[in-house]
Image: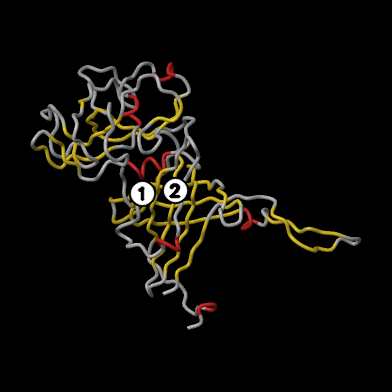
Amino acid sequence: MNPKTNRTTPLVRRVRAFFAPVDRGTGVPTIFDAAQNGRFAIDAPPTPWIDLGWCEGFRRTNAEGSNTGVSALRTGTPAITTGQVRTELESTVEIEFATWGKLQMALSCGSQQMNLLETAGASTSNGSGGTAASASSLVPGSTASSLQMSDTTVFMSGDLVSVDLDYTGQTGYVGSGVSGAYVRSAMDVGGDTNYIRRISLNVSRVVEVKDGALRLETPLLAGVPVEGMKVSRLVGFVDREGGSFFQEWSGLFVMQGEQGDRVIYHYPRLQTLRGAMEKRETLAAPLDRIRLAGAFRALPVTDANDGERILCFRSYLPA
């Protein structure tokens, strides 16, 4: 088969979505090199890519698709088209997550995605969670998958936990591993010591409590806990309509061909485009399946090979 004129058409069932952190402070995204890693095992993505599972409704659009991104360059009298110029660079992506979880909700909510921290006694009710119970301290020896603690009696197998620093007046992007919020003024937070654990994406589920340690189902996104991190138990997750913070991630969408080929869409920088939204699919009355619907706008990066400003890299790996 001539590799220049491959005669097969990709036959795919679904899209597999992977996301990775963007350093919000520096604007540095996670870059995927299809030449090096394009054939990675679909169930074992390269670090630091996080598997969000199989997804539905993958749709991408760009300015050129509506004939507004490219204009004719005309010269002479009468004017004759002698070339083309790119006048607009715009690209968006939409996808429906097949499962619900902390990261799927964070990617689709449009603003801060918060943890519902266990409240302290008769805490005053609040939409995103009232005053949180005191966090538990870690002791030396913790890893990304095992939290060493002096007292584990308040935890049990099955608990969800948020592991992060105390809030002590920090401003700017906060949250370990992935920035979960932007604090403009310490006055906005109002002295909530647990605020960073409230917005942190550094969460996991406890699968065993043994020998003074909490063993976690999945490694913490931020890796080995640093000094000063504490553990808060949470009961679930909450997001809100509105807010001024925009989630930003690097995105990777893989279409695995039935004949061994693969199509890969890599967006180095994606920001959430709209507020929280769901899609409803009727299974068999009265049961409906509710999917999280995410929409993202691509932001540009510079390709080191030639200095061009790029929104998306589409790779095709023949069978």
> What residue would you read off at disc 1?
48
Closest to the observer, 17 or 60: 17
Look at label 1 and name its amino acid: Pro
- Measured as percent of width and height from the top left, residue 228 is found at 28, 26
Q: Position of residue 176 (x, y in %)?
A: 35, 34
Position of residue 211 in the picture relative to residue 85 (left or right): left
Mark 1 residue crowding within 10 angstroms, few (<14) / some (14–19) / many (20+):
few
Q: Which mark identifies residue 193? A: none
Q: Quadrant of residue 256?
A: bottom left
Assign a secondary structure to mark 1. Answer: loop
- Are the residues tagged 2 and 1 within 8 Å (C-beta)? yes
**Residue under label 2:** 30
Give the CA separation, mark 2 to mark 1: 8 Å
- For the C terminus, give its image quadrant: bottom left
Residue drawn at (15%, 37%) of the image: 214
Can you say whether 249 is above or below 57 in the image?
Answer: above
User: In the structure shown, which secondary structural element does the residue marked by tag 2 occupy?
Assistant: loop
Q: Please indicate whether residue 227 sits to the left or right of residue 112 in the image.
A: left
Task: State whether residue 137 is above or below residue 158.
Answer: above
118 sits to left or right of 155:
right
Residue at the image point whose x is 39% and y is 54% from the top: 17
Colour pattern of the rendering: secondary structure
Going from N to C along the chain, the mark reached first, 2 or 1, is: 2
Vertical position of residue 311 compared to residue 317: above or below:
above
Q: Nearer the viewer, residue 11 or 161?
A: 161
Query: Neighbour class for label 2 at 10 Å: few (<14), some, many (≥20)?
Result: many
- Residue 231 at x, y percent in the picture: 23, 29
The three-letter code of the residue at mark 2 reads Thr
Whole-percent x and y of residue 305?
57, 57
| Quarter of the rendering containing residue 86 | bottom right
Left or right relative to 161: residue 42: right
